[in-house]
């Protein structure tokens, strides 16, 4: 079969109808500061499933209240959250999508924690609160909280777990050498925290369940790191037990430092470099919403799956439209078939 966006994808127990992914995108739409998904989330996510998306990754979902960016972010810090996530997950799966969820902690980028925590006490910028460095025991407890949130996600029925190791959130705050100035074991090896989170989650989810990590494989600006360091980090995380790498860039040390080549497909060279170096399958993301470009990224071997974020905010049926635009008659829901004759 010739490779295209329409080609099904199988990785271990994860079987996708096509190569199209909705990446995690915070909706900042929880009501009542309790981290609960609402009808907004249900409609938002299920629409993208109706729209033919192969894999939907639920937005940054936090392991404790102080791990949220804002009071309106989602959480899975208690069993009480499980039913609302289960309703959404089932809705997406009924329409043919597989579902992953991004388990996260914002660390020093939390705006709602009274005193945010991080690997060190350095603030992200003067617009952000000064964080407190976690004690070694607190770091170990944090690892357990990632594990517990992932287990709750499994109980809610997800097909895959994604860990958020990108964009300057807590795991990134540990593996970034310029942020992490610790003198304990989590500073001796800055990837140790991420590795322990992966191992803890891997050991607690069903064997064979897809486990991914999103990594900023380049971090721009003073104190950032290059792709060679990003690849070293990915190597450690791959060895710890992830099956799939979601490759993004930036967000660790600067809000202002942008990639030099921002434009369509700007992160593809980084995704390709990681894929070639590590040998694990890769999701690429970043201005891939022109369907022929997304198709070319797959066919050229830059990545195994293509994620489209803002394009799917504009068009919930981006996947159906992209399949049409690249020469496949999409399998639209029966009720919509006359729109796709
Ligand atoms: C509204 C919005 C919310 C986002 N929230 C998250 C998030 O929760 N986790 C994450 O890793 N990235 C997040 N991102 C980044 C996207 O997942 C994606 O990597 C980025 O938008 C680039 O892809 P695009 O050019 O297709 O939009 C967000 C982006 C947007 C626009």
Image (tube, rainbow, N blue to C red):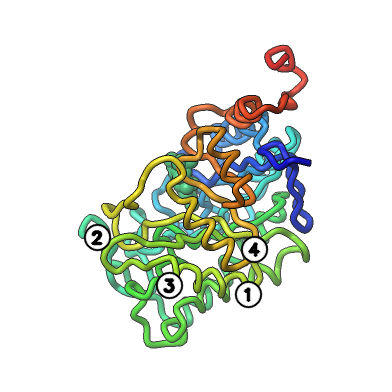
What x and y, as percent, mark residue 16?
73, 44
- For the residue pair 36 and 196, the one nearer the viewer reads as 196
User: The residue tagged with tag 1: helix, strand or loop?
Assistant: helix
Q: Residues within 10 Å of mark 3 (few under 14, many from 20)?
A: many
Establish whether ligand 1 lies closer than 8 Å to the Cβ of label 1.
no
71 with respect to 44 (left or right): left
Residue 325's tag is none
Tally the numbered discs: 4
Q: What's the distance in space between the residues labelled 4 and 3, CA to CA?
A: 23 Å
Residue with the mark numbered 2? 125
Quadrant housing residue 42: top right
**Residues marked 3 and 2 touching at CB (< 8 Å):** no
Residue with the mark numbered 1? 239
Q: Quadrant of the C terminus?
A: top right
Residue 174's tag is 3
User: The residue tagged with tag 3: helix, strand or loop?
Assistant: helix
Residue with the mark numbered 4? 280
Q: Is residue 31 visible?
A: no
132 with respect to 101 (left or right): left
Q: What's the distance in space between the residues labelled 3 and 2, CA to CA?
A: 17 Å
107 with respect to 60 (left or right): left
Residue sitting at x 75%, y 27%: 331
Q: Is residue 157 visible?
A: yes
What x and y, as percent, mark residue 269?
48, 54
First in sequence: mark 1 vs mark 4: 1
Q: What's the distance in space between the residues labelled 3 and 1, CA to CA?
A: 18 Å
What x and y, as percent, mark residue 96?
74, 36
Q: Residues within 10 Å of mark 4 (few under 14, many from 20)?
A: some
User: The residue tagged with tag 4: helix, strand or loop?
Assistant: loop
What x and y, as percent, mark residue 149?
60, 60
């Amino acid at each position: 079969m010739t490779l295209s966006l329409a080609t099904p994808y199988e990785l271990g127990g994860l079987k996708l109808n096509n190569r199209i992914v909705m990446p995690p995108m915070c909706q900042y739409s929880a009501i009542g500061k309790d981290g609960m998904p609402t009808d907004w989330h249900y409609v938002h996510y299920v629409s993208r499933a109706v729209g033919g998306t192969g894999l939907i990754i639920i937005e940054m979902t936090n392991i404790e209240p102080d791990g949220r960016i804002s009071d309106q972010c989602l959480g899975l810090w208690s069993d009480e959250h499980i039913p609302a996530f289960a309703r959404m997950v089932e809705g997406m799966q009924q329409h043919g999508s597989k579902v992953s969820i991004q388990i996260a902690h914002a660390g020093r980028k939390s705006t709602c924690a009274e005193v945010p925590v991080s690997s060190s006490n350095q603030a992200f910028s003067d617009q952000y609160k000064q964080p407190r460095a976690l004690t070694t025991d607190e770091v170990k407890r944090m690892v357990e909280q990632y594990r517990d949130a992932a287990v709750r996600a499994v109980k809610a029925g997800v097909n895959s777990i994604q860990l958020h190791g990108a964009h300057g959130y807590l795991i990134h705050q540990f593996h970034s050498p310029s942020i992490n100035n610790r003198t304990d074991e989590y500073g001796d090896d800055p990837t140790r925290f991420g590795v322990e989170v992966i191992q803890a989650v891997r050991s607690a989810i069903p064997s064979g369940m897809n486990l991914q990590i999103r990594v900023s494989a380049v971090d721009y600006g003073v104190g950032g790191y290059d792709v060679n360091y990003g690849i070293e980090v990915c190597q450690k995380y791959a060895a710890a037990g992830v099956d799939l790498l979601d490759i993004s860039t930036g967000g660790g040390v600067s809000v202002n430092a942008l990639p030099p080549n921002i434009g369509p497909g700007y992160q593809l060279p980084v995704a390709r470099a990681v894929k070639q170096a590590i040998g694990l399958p890769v999701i690429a993301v970043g201005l891939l919403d022109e369907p022929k470009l997304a198709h070319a990224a797959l066919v050229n071997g830059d990545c195994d799956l293509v994620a489209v974020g803002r394009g799917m905010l504009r068009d919930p049926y981006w996947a159906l439209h992209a399949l049409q635009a690249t020469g496949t008659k999409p399998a639209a829901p029966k009720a919509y078939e006359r729109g796709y004759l």
